[in-house]
Image (cartoon, rainbow, N blue to C red):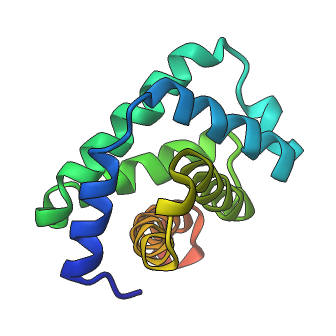
Amino acid sequence: MSFTNEQKIIVQSTFAQVADADRLAARFYDRLFVIDPSTRPLFRHDLSEQRMKLMQTIAVVVNALDHLDTIVPAIESLGRRHVAYGVTPAHWDSVGAALLGALEEAFGAAFTPEVREAWASAYGLIAETALNAAASIASPANDAV
């Protein structure tokens, strides 16, 4: 998946404009549970803390877009950890759709096709990295003979 410098700038500049991070996170989870109700049981605790963690994670990733290689190990760890939570590859698709929908709702007309594509590319890159790491823990190729 490609992610251009222009897309990086778009993601960073639009994220900097998020006025209410908790509201964006609440929109995200509302959308996620509608898009994919199978994700709701994965969240057994109060969502206020989860919303804060989500926004902190997004902020770390967005701020590291200039040097993604420095956070690849953390993204891989996230992917492996989420397997233990019961997250499936299909859930990652649902999360991406919910994120894009929440951003579109938050930004309205400012969420242009170019902005959508930039965010979709950024999320796709992160999800691909996490999914590859998650797949590696269950891969028979890792069981050397």
| Residue 17 visible in image | yes
Observer-nearest residue: 121 or 131?
Answer: 121
Q: Quadrant of residue 64?
A: bottom left
Observer-nearest residue: 130 or 93?
Answer: 93
All told, the count of numbered labels is: 0
Observer-nearest residue: 108 or 124?
Answer: 108
Asked if residue 145 is positioned above or below residue 78 in the image, the reply reads below
Residue at image location 67% in from the left, 61% down from the top? 97
Asked if residue 8 is positioned above or below residue 86 in the image, the reply reads below
Residue at image location 68% in from the left, 36% down from the top? 29
Farthest-out residue, front: 109
Residue 50 image position (x, y, % from top left)? 54, 23
Residue 1 image position (x, y, % from top left)? 41, 86
Left or right position of 49 against 6: right
Residue at image location 71% in from the left, 56% down from the top? 91
Residue 114 image position (x, y, % from top left)? 43, 79
Asked if residue 53 is positioned above or below residue 13 in the image, the reply reads above
Asked if residue 50 is positioned above or below residue 108 in the image, the reply reads above
Left or right position of 59 against 32: left
Left or right position of 98 against 104: right
